[in-house]
């Protein structure tokens, strides 16, 4: 009895019906050529599997982990949208141009640095730290209970993957500036500054409205840094009690 | 927090190594393959409503990866189909030189297969799916799947016999 290659292939793949399988197995006892043809099919499968098996053990690229965990899901537009679920802006520093970014930052920082001492941003050893009203607000002000007319509005407070506490803020005095600062070794280190799209509207819901007023690059930076969910009113208050130490 | 959304993300994470392997079998180049996986993840999360509750995730995801790849081939148009095999051919190696070059020889041979045969081979022989599952993913009848698989196998066998011919 002769079998087509396709039949032998199906046999090697375990896809044959019982009757044909039995015929092949009966023929195998006496047909060395048949056995060899099947062995070749199996060998090919083994070679293919061996060639691609190592991919399973490769470390997963961070960008894929990021997409799987954070890319916004569908059909949630009607919900209250937590920060992590806001549509990830297709913005990146590289696309936008590192030069443009640093230029913007330079201009913003210069404007602040020209302010008298005690301004909201100070530099020390080339690093931007929160000072004055900003430092006080970052340390003491709770996003859930801030006066609508406070000069600094706290946006989101969260725990970064590094373990540090970070908070986004909007400075509402002269220029509307938004930024992100993390508490590290007793100081609020300013991670980034950007022009705020619009001042967060006063009134109820300051937490969420401040979040939605975040410039996209800032939201993106938070997305990159955040571990888990933003702090809620309770965990925010607890973090303040501990002086924002991890 | 949406429980099903979290559940989907958890399952996607578990599936990631296999999605990467499948994409690698299709696209060969690691960066291109991971691009496909990323596109597929984002499409899946955007279209999760299309996945019926309780339906297995893996076939659906393999299908999305494969569609992303087909889209990519289409957008690259003739160029990819005409030049990729020639470029790959320059890296052809003698499989007798060791296990590493054996891997390259197999990948090289697979990359030379026409797209539909490569999909069939990757799904059945590398991912170990059944004919029925592979046919569903490729959106073709099982008969079409098996004939593509048979032709793909035959071509691979011929190419690999050539590279390992000296040993036989």
Image: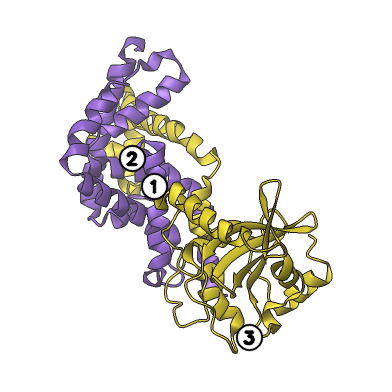
Above or below — where is A147 with respect to B125? below
CB atoms of marks 3 and 1 within 8 Å? no
Could you say which chain is coloured yellow in the image? A
Could you say which chain is coloured purple in the image? B
CB atoms of marks 2 and 3 within 8 Å? no
Looking at the rendered structure, whether the residues under marks 3 and 1 are on a common chain is answered as no
Marks 3/1: CA–CA distance? 45 Å
Above or below — where is B101 with respect to B120? above
Which label was assigned to residue A148? 3
Q: Residue at x 77, y 76 (%)?
A: A237
CB atoms of marks 2 and 1 within 8 Å? yes
Q: Residue B42, position in %: x, y?
A: 41, 60
For label 2, the crowd category at 10 Å Cα-Cα, with few meaning under 14, some 14 to 19 and many 20 or more, is many
Q: Which residue is labeled 2 in the image?
A: B27
Q: Which residue is drawn at 63% across and 71% down?
A: A156
Q: Which chain is mark 1 on? A: B
Q: Which chain is mark 2 on? A: B
Q: Residue furthest bottom?
A: A203
Above or below — where is B107 with respect to B117? above
Numbered disc in front, either 3 or 1: 3
Q: Residue at x 34, y 16 (%)?
A: B164
Looking at the rendered structure, whether the residues under marks 2 and 1 are on a common chain is answered as yes
- From the viewer's perspective, is A130 left or right of A36? right
Which label was assigned to residue B35? 1
Q: Residue A3, position in %: x, y?
A: 23, 35
The image quadrant where one finds the N terminus of chain A is top left
Quadrant position of residue A25:
top left
Numbered disc in front, either 2 or 3: 3
For label 3, the crowd category at 10 Å Cα-Cα, with few meaning under 14, some 14 to 19 and many 20 or more, is some
Residue A223, can we see it?
A: no
Marks 2/3: CA–CA distance? 54 Å
């Amino acid at each position: 009895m002769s079998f087509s290659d396709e039949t032998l292939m199906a046999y090697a793949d375990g896809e044959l019906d019982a009757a044909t399988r039995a015929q092949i197995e009966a023929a195998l006892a006496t047909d060395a050529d048949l056995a060899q043809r099947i062995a070749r099919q199996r060998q090919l499968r083994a070679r293919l599997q061996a060639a691609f098996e190592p991919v399973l053990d490769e470390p997963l690229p961070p960008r894929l982990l990021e997409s799987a965990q954070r890319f916004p899901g569908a059909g949630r537009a009607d919900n209250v949208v937590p920060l992590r679920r806001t549509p990830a802006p297709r913005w990146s520093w590289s696309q936008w141009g590192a030069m443009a970014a640093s230029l913007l930052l330079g201009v913003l920082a210069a404007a602040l640095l020209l302010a008298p001492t005690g301004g909201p941003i100070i530099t020390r050893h080339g690093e931007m730290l929160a000072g004055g009203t900003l430092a006080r607000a970052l340390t003491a002000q709770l996003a859930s209970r801030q006066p609508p007319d406070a000069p600094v509005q706290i946006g989101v407070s969260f725990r970064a993957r590094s373990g540090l506490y970070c908070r986004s803020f909007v400075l509402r005095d002269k220029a509307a500036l938004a930024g992100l600062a993390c508490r590290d070794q007793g100081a609020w280190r300013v991670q980034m500054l950007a022009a705020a799209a619009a001042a967060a509207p006063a009134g109820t819901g300051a937490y969420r409205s401040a979040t939605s007023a975040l410039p996209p690059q800032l939201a993106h930076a938070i997305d990159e840094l955040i571990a888990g969910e933003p702090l809620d009113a309770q965990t925010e208050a607890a973090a303040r009690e501990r002086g924002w130490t991890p | 927090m949406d429980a099903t959304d979290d559940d989907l993300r958890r399952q996607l994470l578990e599936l990631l190594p296999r999605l990467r392997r499948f994409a690698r079998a299709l696209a060969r180049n690691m960066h291109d393959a991971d691009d496909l996986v990323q596109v597929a993840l984002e499409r899946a999360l955007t279209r999760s409503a299309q996945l019926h509750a309780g339906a297995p995730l893996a076939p659906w995801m393999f299908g999305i990866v494969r569609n992303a790849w087909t889209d990519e081939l289409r957008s690259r148009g003739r160029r990819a189909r005409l030049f990729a095999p020639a470029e790959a051919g320059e890296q052809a190696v003698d499989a007798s030189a060791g296990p590493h070059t054996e891997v390259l020889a197999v990948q090289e041979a697979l990359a030379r297969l026409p797209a539909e045969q490569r999909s069939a081979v990757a799904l059945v022989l590398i991912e170990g799916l059944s004919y029925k599952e592979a046919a569903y993913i490729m959106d073709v009848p099982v008969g079409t799947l098996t004939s593509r698989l048979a032709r793909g196998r035959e071509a691979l066998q011929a190419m690999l016999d050539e590279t390992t011919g000296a040993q036989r």
